[in-house]
Structures are given as structure tokens and as C-alpha cells.
Image: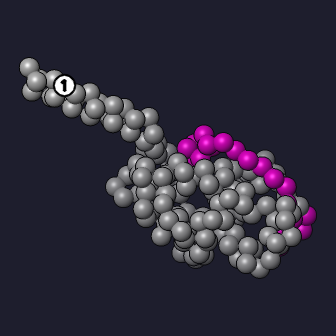
Amino acid sequence: MKLLRCALSGLIFLASVLAVTAVHALPPAQGRVVLTITGPLDLANDVGKATFDMRMLEALPQHSFTTSSPWYKTPVKFTGPLLADVLKAAGARGVTLNAVALNGYKVRIPTSDASLGVVLARLIDDQPLSVRDRGPLFIVYPFDSAAALRTSTYYGRSIWQLSAIEVE
């Protein structure tokens, strides 16, 4: 009888762990993958990586800000999920992000920058970003929110045509 109770307790524990994991698991991408995150991840949805299609990114809370930048003549509105929310969705753990563009260009971004309100812009002035217009994803800082962000350091960390993030 004692053995049966132990076995039953073990099964209940295992079922609760699996239920919690299922609730917090990142679902697999159903459409074309637009962002791949690799490195130390707690919530990968593919072997060793977290992949996102555009619908998955759209399902995250969306944030918008209008800001000036060196790339546009007038301030424009950027909309997309916060970098912090995307990293959280993947369960990313690390101190540095290597953001990679479609052409292989890379920039290093401290993970702590995610606390600055950085978005993975998917819309510009409420229109989808095409590859021609620096899309489909563009890491953008809210430059007009603080003078400290209007420097070459933060402009240099803004990467367009984002396709991957390598977490270190």
C-alpha cells in the first residue's frame, strides 16, 4: 500500500510538472519564421532554439512610440513587441545579445538594454516593414525619450532586417 501511495504521488507530481511546462511552453511557429533566438533558453520551441513567425510576435503585447532617428527625415511611429517580452517568451538567459541581420551583419547589445523600452518594430507609421524598408523587424530604441539614447552607441545597436538573436 505504501508503495502504491509513493507511485501515485510520483505520478501526480510528474503530471503537475508537465501541466506547468505546457502552460508556459513557447508554441511552435506555424508560418514563415522571421526571428530565431539561440543560446541559453528555457522555453525553446525547436531543437536548441526559439523560432517566431510574425503572428507569434503580433500576439505579444504591442508597444508604439514616435521618435526621431538618423534614418528618417521626420519622426516616425514604430510598433512591435518589447525586446524584453520577446526574450521572456523564449526564456532567454544571458548578458549579451548578438543581433543578426538578414545579410549577416551583427551588433552586440547588452541584455540590460531591454529595460529601456526597446521594441522589435514590425510596423512603421502603422504599416508593415518590408525588407526594402528595413524590415521585417527593426530593433529600435525610443531615442526621443532620453537624451542619453541619442548617441552613436544606441544608434549603432539599432539593427534593421533583424533575423536572429544569439544570447550569450
Q: Residue furthest right?
A: 74
Image position of 36 (left or right of 45): right
Q: Residue at x 16, y 23 (%)?
A: 5
Image position of 10 (left or right of 137): left
Q: Residue furthest top?
A: 1
Q: Quadrant of the N terminus?
A: top left
In the image shown, does 152 or 73 lie closer to the viewer? Answer: 152
Q: Residue furthest bottom?
A: 152
Magenta stretch: give its range.
53-74
Image spot of residue 114 (x, y percent): 65, 60
Image spot of residue 140 (x, y percent): 72, 63
In the image shown, does 16 or 33 lie closer to the viewer? Answer: 16
- Up-down: is 62 above or below 72? above
Image position of 13 (left or right of 34): left
- Up-down: is 41 above or below 6? below
- Look at the image and say whether residue 29 sits in the magenta stretch: no
Look at label 1 and name its amino acid.
Leu
Q: Is residue 168 visible?
A: yes
Q: Is residue 131 visible?
A: no
Dividing the picture into quarters, in which one does residue 150 lie? bottom right
Residue at which label 1 appears: 8
Dividing the picture into quarters, in which one does residue 130 lie? bottom right
Q: Residue at x 9, y 27 (%)?
A: 3
Q: Residue furthest front?
A: 2
In the image shown, does 12 or 133 lie closer to the viewer? Answer: 12
Q: Residue at x 85, y 55 (%)?
A: 66
